[in-house]
Image (tube, grey):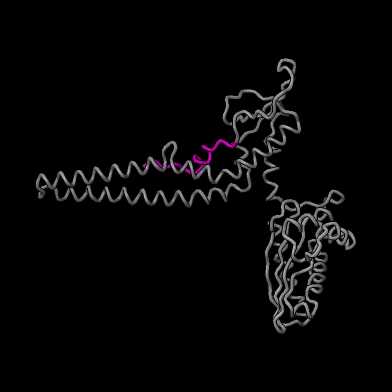
Amino acid sequence: MRRNKLSQILKTQNIVAILFCLFTFGYSAYSAEMKMGYIDSNRLLNEYKGKDELKVKLQKQLEKWEKEAMTKKEKIQGLIKEFESQGAMLSDDAKARKQKDIEQKQMEYETFVQKIWGAEGDAKKINEEVMKPVVDKVNVILQRIGKERDYTIIFDVASTGVVYAKEGMDLTNEVVDEINKEFAPISGTKADTGRTYFCVMKFKENSEASKYGDSKTMVKYIKGGLNGSKDAKYKSVDDKIFSDAITQMNLGTKKEEDLTPDEVAKVGETARANIVIIGEVERVGESLTLKCKVVNVSDSQILADVLETSRTSQQTDLNNMVNKIITKILEKLKK
């Protein structure tokens, strides 16, 4: 059986079309100045930080197919071995039946291999399915670059016979940076690139926690914990700025603690924060459970989702619980 290596399958996916016709000129092409740029899709894929996850997804299905193919092949080999050992004792009719059975199994095996690893087989289809989100992201980035910088065409040197390219035309680094933004550490604000600014929204609370004002207490603890962490780059947004951002949302009857991640991100953007922390606190007797999520302002994605429980509401136990929460959050943000 011909085995297609994962790297070969990845390369079959042409990340972008050879030429991107980004817009049509309203005047004669002869009078227009042609501006071209290019990317190297092989290098782009190599430097994409999500490539290992893609490989895992592909490998799982490939291994399943390879196992199935191996089982079929071993069955054929078993039939051949049985035929060879029993051949002298079989009648002509029995031999013909066994030979036909072997031929049938061999045909089924070859059909299966072609179905999976053929030119338009399932391996190619699943590769395209897994790669589609990345392809779409790259295309969006290229469309934006092309339109903003007035490129006539952008092409892929990995799929063309390019022998010379003028320095300064290579857009690969920029596309790699853009597509890897979701894997990058959270950046600071424009005013202070060395800091990561954060807001802490009011936590949801059950009736018992509300009775004791646990949400307000936990918000205070989380803010203090992050501001005072050993990683000094985290700084809370000024309370007045955060309050004004909430006011601008015009929530009406909706409570602050019930905002969706998208709405939370909008509040964070208005407050010029990088991340916003939301959560829930539940009290049952003396026990408190705190759950925190960290929302990335740039894309509304959840960067961390952590939970801890304190057996009592004593100051020491609450401090320990919050410290564990802060530690978990920082660990996840560093990944």
Say which residue appears at 49% left-offset and 41% top-offset.
9
Where the N terminus falls, by quadrant? top left
Q: Quadrant of residue 48?
A: top right
Q: Position of residue 80 (x, y in %)?
A: 22, 47
Q: Report the span colored magenta.
A: 1-15
Where the C terminus falls, by quadrant? bottom right
Q: Position of residue 52 (x, y in %)?
A: 57, 49
Say which residue appears at 61% left-offset and 48% top-offset.
50
Q: Position of residue 49 (x, y in %)?
A: 63, 47
Say which residue appears at 51% left-offset and 37% top-offset.
12
Q: Is residue 4 magenta?
A: yes
In the image, 210 versus 185, the foreground residue is 210
Q: Residue furthest right?
A: 240
Q: Is residue 136 left or right of residue 187?
A: left
Q: Is residue 325 left or right of residue 65?
A: right
Q: Quadrant of residue 47?
A: top right
Q: Is residue 320 left or right of residue 129?
A: right
